[in-house]
Image (cartoon, rainbow, N blue to C red):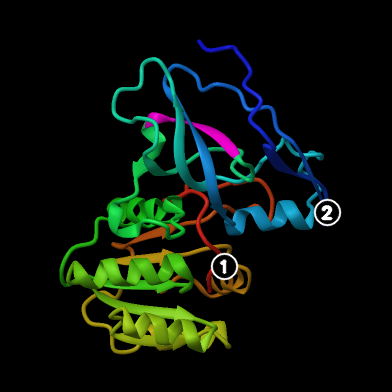
């Protein structure tokens, strides 16, 4: 295990100190563990699950660790652990880590993907894409299924495209007109607004063939959508499968199995 501390020049990290309070502090850049790499970060995406940490909730402990809760980082490998064989210094990667609001962070080698040369110099938070692929795989989407996607942010839009390319018929539900336009561009067969949740569920059910929806995928931190589902029931028959995605940090500690971790806020 590497134990030496290498203090990189002018290395810094963000610390969330409380509700709406941050500081930028000097970062001690440790060497990676044997199965890790260290990445000189170019950027980090802001997950919707990070927003409640910034806003403040009673169950969070402040101040947070340096760089936390950033986990959607990308950058260039500058140090490789002793047992890592699949990556080398100088490679540009997207990563899943825990403290990526910083100049440097370490991640296990199995939490990295190489960024292809075609995307050189482009920002690339790979973790949200991994969430979409994870949810799609676990949803077991097949051709001819009726799929309802509730919430069309980044994640819902990605899943709309993946499901339609798999041959499924997608009904997209969102409260935002531009999101519904995106869903239509990505292949959704039917668009339903969510201004009136109860009416939206009725509209979603209308015209569906067979027993209704084989899959209902609920994306993001639900808000009004969660009320809609609890109060009026899901648009799903007994034979279907509902997949909930996204961390529920805004409402309290997670209390349900999630198909994807750290997903983007939608609806």
How many neighbours does mark 1 have within 10 angstroms: few (below 14), some (14-19), or many (20 or more)? few
- Rendered location of residue 51, percent (x, y): 68, 58
Question: Does 71 appear above or below 205?
Answer: above
Q: Which residue is mark 1?
A: 230
**Residue sitting at 27 percent across and 66 percent down?**
162
**Residue at position x 28%, y 83% in the image:** 208
Image-based side of 5 in relation to 63, left or right:
left
**What is the CA distance from the residue labelled 2 to the residue labelled 1?**
30 Å
Main SS of the magenta part reads strand
Q: Name the residue nearer the viewer: 114 or 240.
A: 114
Q: Let me know if residue 250 appears in the view.
A: no
Q: Is residue 140 above or below residue 203?
A: above
2 vs 1, front mark: 2
Question: The residue tagged with tag 2: helix, strand or loop?
Answer: loop
Q: Secondary structure at mark 1?
A: helix
In magenta, the rendered stretch is: 104-109
For label 2, the crowd category at 10 Å Cα-Cα, with few meaning under 14, some 14 to 19 and many 20 or more, is some
- Residue 23, image x, y percentages: 81, 46
Q: Is residue 67 visible?
A: yes
The relative height of residue 15 versus residue 208 in the rendered view (above or below) is above
Label drawn at residue 19: 2
Residue pictured at 30% horizontal, 23% vertical: 85
Q: Residue at x 61, y 38 (%)?
A: 99
Quarter occupied by residue 250: bottom right
């Amino acid at each position: 295990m590497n134990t030496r501390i290498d203090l990189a020049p002018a290395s810094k990290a963000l610390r969330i100190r409380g509700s709406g309070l941050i500081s930028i502090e000097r970062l001690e850049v440790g060497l990676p563990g044997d199965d890790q790499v260290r990445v000189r970060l170019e950027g980090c995406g802001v997950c919707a699950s990070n927003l409640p940490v910034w806003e403040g909730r009673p169950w969070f402990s402040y101040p947070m660790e340096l760089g936390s809760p950033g986990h959607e980082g990308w950058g260039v490998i500058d140090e490789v652990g002793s047992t890592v064989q699949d990556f080398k210094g100088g490679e540009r990667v997207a990563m899943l880590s825990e403290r990526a609001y910083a100049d440097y962070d370490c991640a296990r080698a199995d939490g990295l993907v190489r960024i292809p040369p075609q995307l050189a110099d482009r920002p690339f938070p790979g973790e949200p894409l991994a969430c979409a692929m994870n949810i799609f795989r676990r949803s077991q989407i097949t051709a001819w299924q009726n799929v309802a996607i509730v919430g069309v942010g980044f994640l819902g839009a990605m899943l709309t495209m993946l499901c339609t390319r798999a041959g499924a018929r997608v009904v997209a539900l969102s409260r935002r007109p531009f999101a519904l336009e995106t869903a239509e561009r990505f292949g959704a067969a039917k668009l339903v607004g969510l201004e009136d949740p109860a009416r939206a569920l009725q509209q979603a059910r209308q015209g569906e063939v067979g027993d209704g929806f084989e899959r209902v995928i609920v994306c993001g931190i639900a808000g009004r959508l969660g009320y809609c589902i609890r109060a009026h029931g899901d648009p799903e028959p007994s034979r279907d499968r509902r997949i909930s995605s996204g961390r529920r940090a805004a409402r309290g500690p997670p209390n349900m199995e999630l198909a994807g971790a750290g997903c983007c806020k939608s609806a």
